[in-house]
Amino acid sequence: MSIKLGPNRYGKAENRVVRVTKTGDTHEIRDLNVSVALSGDMDETHHTGDNAAVLPTDTQRNTVFAFAKKNGITSPEGFGLLLARHFVRSQPTVHHARIGLEEYLWERNPVRPYSFVRSGQETRTARVHYDGDNAWVVSGLRGLVVLNSTGSEFHGYIKDQFTTLQPAHDRVLATEVNAEWRHVSFSSEWDKSYLKVRACLLEAFADTYSLSLQQTLYAMGDRVLNACPGICEIRLSLPNKHHFAVDLSAFGLGNDNEVFFAADRPYGLIEGTVLRETAPDAGPAWD
Amino acid sequence: MSIKLGPNRYGKAENRVVRVTKTGDTHEIRDLNVSVALSGDMDETHHTGDNAAVLPTDTQRNTVFAFAKKNGITSPEGFGLLLARHFVRSQPTVHHARIGLEEYLWERNPVRPYSFVRSGQETRTARVHYDGDNAWVVSGLRGLVVLNSTGSEFHGYIKDQFTTLQPAHDRVLATEVNAEWRHVSFSSEWDKSYLKVRACLLEAFADTYSLSLQQTLYAMGDRVLNACPGICEIRLSLPNKHHFAVDLSAFGLGNDNEVFFAADRPYGLIEGTVLRETAPDAGPAWD
Amino acid sequence: MSIKLGPNRYGKAENRVVRVTKTGDTHEIRDLNVSVALSGDMDETHHTGDNAAVLPTDTQRNTVFAFAKKNGITSPEGFGLLLARHFVRSQPTVHHARIGLEEYLWERNPVRPYSFVRSGQETRTARVHYDGDNAWVVSGLRGLVVLNSTGSEFHGYIKDQFTTLQPAHDRVLATEVNAEWRHVSFSSEWDKSYLKVRACLLEAFADTYSLSLQQTLYAMGDRVLNACPGICEIRLSLPNKHHFAVDLSAFGLGNDNEVFFAADRPYGLIEGTVLRETAPDAGPAWD
Amino acid sequence: MSIKLGPNRYGKAENRVVRVTKTGDTHEIRDLNVSVALSGDMDETHHTGDNAAVLPTDTQRNTVFAFAKKNGITSPEGFGLLLARHFVRSQPTVHHARIGLEEYLWERNPVRPYSFVRSGQETRTARVHYDGDNAWVVSGLRGLVVLNSTGSEFHGYIKDQFTTLQPAHDRVLATEVNAEWRHVSFSSEWDKSYLKVRACLLEAFADTYSLSLQQTLYAMGDRVLNACPGICEIRLSLPNKHHFAVDLSAFGLGNDNEVFFAADRPYGLIEGTVLRETAPDAGPAWD
């Protein structure tokens, strides 16, 4: 037959695990969404339905919860590494594991040491790969919405027969930061690393005088790489959340960039990678 | 004909207006979603399509943006009152205006005085009615997610032939607070009032030792009314975001309320009103 | 104390139940989302956390699944009536039950008599109330998206200082039909009734030459009431899904209502009720 | 500097264009969401904000609408190819264009030849690449929800210390089909091709007696490739929409696969590729 099975993977997706750690009345909480995807000797289940090589997704779910108990959850990246290594090392038919993780962030409600409030707009993310020999870790965040109400221009662009845009010498620049960064070396201080990258992204967004969202994107990536030697590559996806100054002249009113219509669609979408010259091959890190 | 037109309203919904106020380089931002709904002499447009009494929704949108420029936006409630009065007072065929408002909250990015980060999980809300004589204002919030990892029990309930639930003497209590409160008297300090109510809700959620989510609901409402004399009624809708302790005994593991499965559906939904004995008739406030 | 508990209800929301009925290899399927809300003697659980009058939401869920087995699901309305009566009649502390239902529609995949494909854009809905003496049934649908690419005008409206809209003598009219209708008398032929109302709504939308969306709304309601003697009232919520003809003149191109930008926000929202003069008081039907 | 710009692209995303074609009163409608992404000589805008090589996303949007007028929309794939070629051929700094398209499907409302109803659950998709020399076209669909109420088993799998799953000898199999397929040769009959693939997917889902969702996935891909010589590769992503038979034994009721709880999360996720041995290198087709 000239038809064959190509790349494939399977697993239990979106296991919502919450782990509480108690020191007397003072509790800590980690709130994760864990997705497991395994690959290996899976030809038979595709061709004949023989499942002898298949670790059921139900068992994967049980494993996520059991590991949360046995090992605790110190970070999304650390928990992902534990799980990925477990699946590959314990199952001869599983050659590769990919663990995708989202973390929902909480802050303390100061009234009680076991009371919490969901915080922030953004979701912290991680994806971890392990193939029996090597591990790859990508950390990230998404949904971090930022806005500069000045400090942005856009002009000097190509004009063709479909151009109607006027140059802008002062505009709102707003985006939702979706970023992922690849680690070239690991320490176990994933939480500290996350906070450092987040701070770099916010700082670079605010203090880049922007002539294009591309320029801001590059500045954000550059800032992260300069500050974090353990990171070799960062990928950013920045929707340009257009804020159009409303023309109020028909009503005898000026508008010196004071009143904006926040548009939904369409939107500009700027995607780019910033990396070190020395970044090693990414392997499956971004899959 | 025995068929007639009943209650009706129309308007431009979800006008996304962002208002920037500048003091040198230091900017303030208010970010709203404004929905207008008008009613009045609208029989003809329904029966014959004669629009002589209809103020187009397009004009309503223009009005929202023009008022944002002329008057600024000091709060959702204040902006809603301005708009509601304008529509009723300026159009003889419009007898009643309802303005629905959502506010998206931002905090400062300290790097620059014109840079902002979307903050918090919750959306602040308001609905304002004006009928030419009276105004009604309801303020609110939704999407404020809170969790106590202990301090909650549930037992002593009815048992019938469909009961399988076991009593709980220690459980996670988590909910998404959706609340609206009606003002019996107005000052213009809407922002201060909002922060006070929000603080009461968080405090009461955390320091109520809970035997049922209903008990927590009542305590939250009671706390708000005790702290805020200008508020006469509060309505709460609290989904019980179930966190089920995972049974790990098959794997030789205990689980002393440490590992939870955060479930999506179904969920308990607890809805209730707390009000003063002296609360005046609500009129159209909640419509 | 001058603070008291007002109206309240509680229950298990969004029980996703799928019921398969088998006649040999030929299967039937009903796919529902059932939300229970009960009220009655609930003061104690709010004030003290004493749950002696509380039927747990967990038990309510069990009941939904057990009734699906014992009684089958012949329609959302019929299933809702069964459940509502059960809760009120079996529990002295429960005085009122409200059952909300959504039905997801499937069509047969003709390849096998037990194979199905989710069909249509709309969700069928029902809400049922029972208070021990009387029952109320409201049926509905939402998410039925329709569009006429001509046959619609809009002009003759009020002009004020904020008017910029130009009259339209030919426009696209598109909306998402969200409708609910109240039954004054019941038969058990709920499915037949649903299909008849849906057909009336589609017919009236298409063959009303429209001078305003309000006119179309009224025609849709009127058509339903004329065709269905058992229905006394219908409520429609019709977002005007704006399709703006794009101005292509800058590119030397005309646009005779051929190319449209389908906008998201803001949108017009037209809400109205059409009812019989003889409609009885609605009681809690719409709660 | 050891930091550099890596792969990048930018463009106007989610242009919602509706194209009406009229033959007297009989209208045709195509309803698309078009996302443009361009890449080329974009180093300067990233490094300095010099936009001399940048075709603004605003201009891209205008181009989408102008092309819809000038050329009509005969299919997502055809429209994407037109646009991709235009951007690369007309702009020396643009070396590669990727056009992503979604199509929302409508059926006729038979009452009037210009009246339509949104149909089906699924969204048709396409992605088109052009680099000046070659074009790549991937077609697809997503959101096609299917269910077999019998004809599925799952057993014979690996057991380890975390296994609790019992073998199933009769179960519901339900999934949401998300599929994309790569064309090795093009004709212009994209609509006919789409319908053929959709029919193959539905047929293979229904008439495969399934011992694993992987087996069904492979059968679906195999069916498409056997029926469609112009397609060389298909990728499927099939969430296992779990329907758990509810244990009603505590209530004295059996459940012979009649009553199911339709779960949301977690879910199994089965992803796989089926391709021809002779499939050419995919190049950027899947990017």
Image (cartoon, coloured by chain):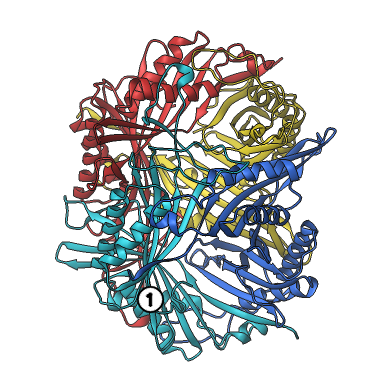
Chain colours: A blue, B yellow, C red, D cyan
Instruction: Tell me: D153 left or right of B72.
Output: left
Three-letter residue code for mark 1: Ala
Chain of the residue that carries numbered disc 1 in the rendered image: D
The image quadrant where one finds the N terminus of chain C is top right
Instruction: Tell me: B276 left or right of C82.
Output: right
The residue beneath circle 1 is: D279
Q: Residue furthest bottom?
A: D92
Task: Give the percent coordinates (x, y) of residue A197.
Answer: 75, 65
Please say if B85 is above or below A212.
Answer: above
Please say if C163 is above or below C129.
Answer: below
Name the quadrant containing residue D262: top left
Who is closer to the viewer here, A266 or B14? A266
Who is closer to the viewer here, C248 or D40? D40
Task: Give the percent coordinates (x, y) of residue A140.
Answer: 67, 62
Instruction: Tell me: C30 left or right of B163.
Output: left
Name the quadrant containing residue A188: bottom right
Please say if A125 is above or below C192.
Answer: below
Q: Secondary structure at mark 1?
A: loop
Who is closer to the viewer here, C120 or B29? C120
